[in-house]
Amino acid sequence: MYRLRASTATDNVTKTRKTIGGLRLAIILSILLFLLLVSALAESAPPVYAQSGFGATPTPVESNATPNTPNEVNVVPTARDSEISKRLQSILDSTGWFANVKVEVKDGIVFLNGQTKTTDYKNWAGDLARNTQDVVAVVNKISLIQPSIWDLQPAFSGLRDLWGNIIQSIPLIIFSVLVLVVTWIIIRLSMTATRASLRHYLKNPLLSNVAAYTLGIIIFVIGFYIILQVAGLTNIAATVVGGTGLLGLALGIAFRDITENFLASIFLSLQDPFHTNDLVEINSILGFVQALTIRVTVLMTLDGTIVQIPNATVYKSNIYNYSSNPNRRVDFVIGVGYVESISDVQQVALKVLEDHPAVLNDPEPLILVESLGSSTVNLHIYFWMNVTNNSWLKVKSSVIRLIKHAFMASAISMPDDAREVIFPEGIPVQWIPPGSEPPTFKAPLPARPQLLEKPEPDSTDAEGELRSEAKDIQDQARRARIPEEGENLLESSDSE
């Protein structure tokens, strides 16, 4: 029932992630289309139609452009005032830039009267008259028209121009959508093909996903660059290509810790220093590996505590993997009295190790003299065991207990360190006359308890079975709530 609920929860999380991914894709496509439309409208130069003098037929001119004045306007070889006036009146009327314009010429002096909307038009009329043949001087009395605050004509004209630009941009928008759709299809196919092709070479899913997403991003940038080039936005296209690397650099600096942990997870996946359920020691923390995500490595310690270690710390630290080698050497020190035969003591301890079911004979156990203490000869005992099936803590406890029992059964002394002894009731003193021999005293050996006559079991109820506690930790982990969500990037070493 628990696994069914977990599977259902996993399916719900997967569906939620797919929905969120679809929403993200729709938002990204909408933003790209909006930016493309705005950029296209900004780059294009829409034609502006100047209205003629309040009711005349509109004549197309360039907007926001200063009119070019002819260098010379010839009328006849000898121009009369009336001919100059008629010629200038005709030119000014035909432009449509002036209202109530009137041209008068007296003795070669041109008088311009009327109204216009901009100073450029007024100056243009003055320059035109000044460059006309046989004109002596120009008196420009053209005044500027002050637009009314209630005049909505510019707004209507702008909306009309905008609508015209949108209609003209429809083919480009359709082409852009088609390119985006084709690009998205190519991205999906290429990512699927990349994962399928790398599945046989990279067992870790993170590496396959990184390679697939990298290829997808490259294809998307190429498709977006094509759209901008077709739209004529070459500057923006160059900015996109150059800004992609700058954006990655900026994000890497801003999110240095996140990027460092992500890269460390990739390197850990490549090096594969541990698997799920391996017993490891990282940064002085001993525990069984539960998961490796893109951010942290999750351990469960021997006391059932969940610990999250950042991947950057894991990658930089010394990693002790006690499960990579199924065998492990265990050692401890025990002291015996100076009066004992060291070789006999070694044989007694070696017999215990050879008879123990959890101690391996290959490599063979060793009982070596380590040092001479203040009151004992210290022996260092080494033996190998299989940590896959047995717990090294339990086996060590069992071996120490059995060796102590064997030493006591063989009357091998294990004295305590020398220390100060206080006799609160005093010590009796016997007077020995001079010349007499002192009496000899022989300390009686301690009575051997009947308990030593019984065979000592390999494991006691207090120690529990000698089997490894990895299964117990795994059961605890299944019932525990792992705080770090995300896909486990490790292979499982569960031997169930």
Image: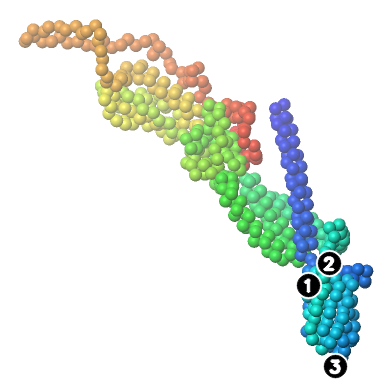
Q: Which amino acid does the dot numbered 3 rest on?
A: Pro
In front of the other: 456 or 331: 331
**Secondary element type, mark 2:** loop
Q: Pointer 3: what residue?
A: 77
Q: Nearer the viewer, mark 2 or mark 1?
A: 2
Q: Nearer the viewer, residue 344 or 70?
A: 70
- The residue beneath circle 2 is 145
Mark 1–mark 3 contact, CB under 8 Å? no
- In the rendered structure, the answer to whether residue 143 lies left or right of residue 211 reads right
Which quadrant, please, contains the C terminus?
top right
**Kind of residue at badge 1:** Asp
Disc 1 or 3, which lies upstream in sequence?
A: 3
Q: Position of residue 132 (x, y in %)?
A: 82, 85
Name the spot of residue 283 as percent of width and height, x first. Answer: 48, 37
Q: Earlier in the sequence, mark 3 or mark 2?
A: 3
Q: Secondary structure at mark 3?
A: loop
Q: Is residue 435 above or below residue 492?
A: above
Q: Could you tell me residue 224's position as x and y percent?
A: 73, 59
Q: In the image, what residue occupies the spot 47% across and 35% down?
A: 284
Per the image, the residue denoted by label 1 is 120
Real-space CA distance between mark 3 and mark 2, rounded to the nearest whole angstrom: 37 Å
Within the image, what quadrant is residue 421 found in? top left
